Amino acid sequence: MPIVILAICCNAIGQSNERLTNIPTLYIDTENDVEIDSKDDYVKAILTCKSLDDSQALVNDSIKIRGRGNSTWSMPKKPYRIKFSSKLHFLNLPAKQDTWVLLANYADKTLMRNGVATELSTRIGFDFTPSTQFVDVVLNGDSIGTYIVTDQMEVKSDRIDVDKLDNAMTTLPDITGGFFLEADGFADGDVKTKTAHGMNIVLKYPDEDDVNESQKQYIFSYVQKFEDALFSSNFKDEKNGYRKYIDIPSFVNWYLSSEITGNPDCFWSTYFYKRRNDPLLRFGPLWDFDIAFNNDSRLGDATNKLMANAAHEPRQWIIQFLKDPWLREQISKRWVELKNENIQQALLDYVDATRVDIDQSQKINFHRWNVLSNIVYLELAARGTYQAEVDFLRSYIVKRFAFLDTQFLPEEITTGVNERITARAQIFPNPVNAKSVVTFELMKPSPVQIIVYDAAGNILNSKTTNANEGVNTVSLADHVAGLSNGIYVLKLTTAQTSTITKKIIVLR
């Protein structure tokens, strides 16, 4: 009965253009009630916003609206792009722009996965984080549920801030930027190329109407130079390897964000950009997380899976990146910093606060879209209630951080008088498979004992191998053969037991 009463109230309020819940309500009425059936052609419309905050209110603003998205456009609850006749701080959001996005989040029954990702982006420190404002939407008199208003991914001074590049800029240094690109599995763009290692690169800015051949040749050649350095024999070299082309802090933040969110599309769709007179490619912004946070059945339960191993192809760049022990060390250090900043609790607090904030709205949403007991896309399960969906998301965050501790926290090192193992053992990939190796460095040749323990401290395997001075790589296949799935501890020690390195490994 409460749902029936709510539905009657919604219709009555919708007819009088009143606010539906405690969050803003957008009333969008297309000209002659025409249907929005294209991602290419805009439809004229009128927008009215009702809000508790009078400064967010809009009355009969002229807009244009069209569809957007890839797989999400085929869903019953559709995402949209809206364009105002002039620039404004829509809903008091930071950017003053005319183009905005309405995310439907139909495949995400918490309605907030994209919001959690933007909270992470803000706290982890990306140059640009898309805005998040929850709204109720009424389209041509039909209440179509809870949406997120957010920024269009475009080059603007208050969005993705790179230098303006006009058609006349064809020589150095002007031609060096700015550019906004996407490594895109769909290759969904008019200006694109494929690298030597099979990565689809789409030029988002400048677009096809503004870019010239010289500019296209420059930026695509530059990306290829980066990839060549990444896959070169000396790719780990600080001056001549990939570091010459990559802003390491932004890469590390982007990679850790991909792993925290468990985003299966993180390598399928990767944004990066280049500024003028800056040799470094910078990663970000974060975007599109409705099937992240363990919401993609193609991966199964991904709580304890690294996206570097399990996310959708193409993964050739990330696999090569993580072969560099120095870079893995930077990832580990940044992970410790984020742990110290208590970022896990910040995400949980965001989930709890958003759950309360959109409670009235989600009831209207799931009355309109009665899907809580149905799998509508790639969900692992249909959990039946909104609270159960939120609880699942919350539980994932807690378990995910615990798992990532096993991957990124520095391993314990005990050093005696005569140090022989100088670098921490690195295992890749981990969770372990038949191709996994352990990499370590010695100051001088020595036998090294490799021991595998279970969680109770029992020795399950112990073998000694002769190792050389410098970097050594040893296959783990023989050391973990016959072990069941689970978490184990790997120890490396020189024969004289002067140095012991411990590393947690996961078997699947």
Image (cartoon, grey):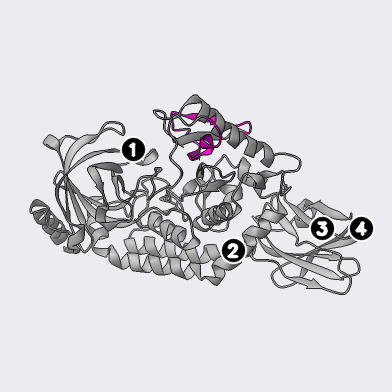
Horizontally, is 313 left or right of 7 in the view? right
Amino acid, disc 3: Glu
Horizontally, is 477 left or right of 61 in the view? right
What residue lies at 53% left-to-right and 62% top-to-bottom? 400
Q: Identify the element where label 2 is drawn.
A: helix
Disc 2 to disc 4, how far (Cα)? Answer: 32 Å
What residue lies at 33% left-to-right and 65% top-to-bottom? 355
What residue lies at 67% left-to-right and 41% top-to-bottom? 230
Q: Which mark is residue 445?
A: 4
Q: Identify the element where label 4 is drawn.
A: loop
Q: Quadrant of the C terminus?
A: bottom right
Amino acid, disc 1: Ser
Q: Which mark is residue 441?
A: 3
Q: Nearer the viewer, residue 455 or 232?
A: 232
Q: Earlier in the sequence, mark 3 or mark 2?
A: 2
Disc 3 to disc 2, how far (Cα)? Answer: 23 Å
Read off the magenta span. Answer: 171-197
Q: Mark 1 = which residue?
A: 74
* Vertical placement of residue 9 versus 416, above or below: above
**Mark in the foreground, 4 or 1:** 4
* Vertical placement of residue 128 versus 404, above or below: above
Q: Mark 2 = which residue?
A: 335
Disc 4 to disc 1, how far (Cα)? Answer: 61 Å
* Callout 2 crowding tier (Cα within 10 Å): few <14, some 14–19, many ≥20: many
Q: Identify the element where label 1 is drawn.
A: helix
Q: Earlier in the sequence, mark 2 or mark 4?
A: 2
Contact check, label 2 and label 4, Cβ < 8 Å: no
* Callout 1 crowding tier (Cα within 10 Å): few <14, some 14–19, many ≥20: few
Image location of residue 369, percent across then percent down: 26, 50
Q: Nearer the viewer, residue 221 or 436?
A: 221
